[in-house]
Image (spheres, rainbow, N blue to C red):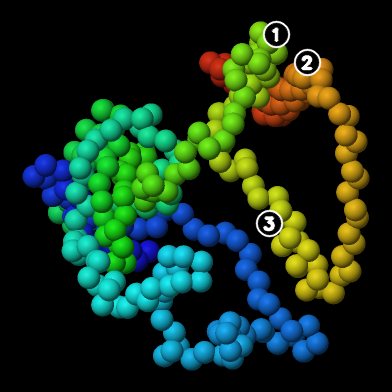
């Protein structure tokens, strides 16, 4: 897989040549807008709101709206004047504890892969960060844009995550959240039991995109000429006031049955395995 960025990670006077490679991939179904009578793709035109006519690219400029309906034009030279000096290094400014960082700061992950000659320094930084349970914070310029970046240890890899700047996060004070003293001790105890019943080891392959799978099945069926039937879902009855305790008890019962079914299923698989006694050798036939 081709590198998105090539440069070096630096901390102190240590320089580690690395390549930035993608760590995630898009897995969405894409569609084209079509003209139904002839199934021809739709072409979008750039229309001037004032004249209602298409505008050629050479007459299009970028404008910043500083008031409603008022713009200042920003040219290519303006962007160059504001550009940060290009650099091929990701300088770690600070090391911080993982739990100190609001998860909302993290955006897009990339693998940092050591380039030739950087393996030992890479392994050294990884071990030091892992032992300290630290995240490295620095800045990187990718595709002419400066980003805040965090470097984490994930297994044997150093993973760089593009981060949001603090100005991009919404202050929680803008919203109203319930007070903790609204919860009764009995409700909390049952909720904790429910959490314990549903606690499992994280297995990412267990969670699939059900909508994507069903949509792809519909598409494949239509390609085969099958007629798709759609049934309106039944509306859930609004019971009004939520009886939290009864819902918790019902959830606990369901959780207990689910765990019981998993235990029975596992036992069935174990019984299906061929049985044998350890340390017992087959008897030899006596010669006649």
Determine the secondary structure under disc 1.
helix
Q: Earlier in the sequence, mark 1 or mark 3?
A: 1
Viewer-side residue, 223 vs 249: 249
- In space, the residues marked 1 and 2 are separated at their CA atoms by 8 Å
- Name the residue tied to disc 2: 245
- Location of the N terminus (image quadrant): bottom left
The residue located at (15%, 54%) in the rendering is: 117
- Location of the C terminus (image quadrant): top right
- Name the residue tied to disc 3: 212
Does the residue at mark 1 contact the one at mark 2 (Cβ under 8 Å)?
yes
- The location of residue 27, given as percent across then percent down, is 57, 59
- Name the residue tied to disc 1: 186
Q: Earlier in the sequence, mark 1 or mark 2?
A: 1
Q: Earlier in the sequence, mark 3 or mark 2?
A: 3
The residue located at (25%, 66%) in the rendering is: 82
- Is label 1 or label 3 in front? 1
């Amino acid at each position: 897989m081709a590198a998105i960025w090539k440069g070096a990670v630096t901390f102190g006077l240590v320089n580690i040549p690395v390549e930035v490679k993608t760590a995630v991939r898009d897995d969405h179904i894409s569609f084209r807008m079509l003209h139904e009578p002839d199934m021809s793709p739709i072409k979008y035109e750039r229309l001037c709101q004032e004249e209602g006519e298409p505008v050629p690219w050479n007459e299009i400029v970028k404008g910043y709206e500083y008031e409603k309906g008022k713009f200042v034009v920003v040219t290519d030279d303006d962007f160059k004047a504001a550009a940060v000096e290009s650099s091929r290094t990701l300088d770690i400014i600070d090391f911080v504890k993982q739990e100190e960082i609001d998860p909302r700061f993290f955006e897009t992950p990339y693998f940092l892969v050591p380039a030739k000659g950087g393996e030992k320094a890479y392994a050294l930084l990884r071990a030091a960060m892992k032992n300290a349970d630290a995240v490295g914070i620095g800045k990187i310029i990718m595709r002419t844009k400066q980003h805040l970046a965090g470097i984490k240890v994930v297994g044997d890899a150093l993973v760089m995550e593009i981060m949001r700047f603090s100005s991009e996060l919404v202050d929680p004070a803008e919203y109203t959240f319930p007070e903790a003293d609204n919860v009764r001790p009995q409700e909390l105890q049952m909720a904790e039991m429910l959490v314990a019943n549903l606690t499992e080891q994280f297995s990412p392959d267990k969670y699939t995109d059900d909508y994507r799978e069903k949509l792809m099945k519909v598409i494949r069926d239509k390609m085969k000429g099958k007629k798709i039937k759609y049934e309106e879902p039944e509306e859930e009855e609004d019971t009004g006031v939520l009886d939290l305790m009864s819902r918790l008890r019902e959830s606990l019962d369901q959780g207990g049955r689910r765990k019981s079914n998993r235990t029975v299923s596992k036992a069935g698989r174990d019984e299906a395995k061929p049985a044998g006694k350890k340390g017992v050798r087959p008897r030899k036939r006596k010669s006649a």
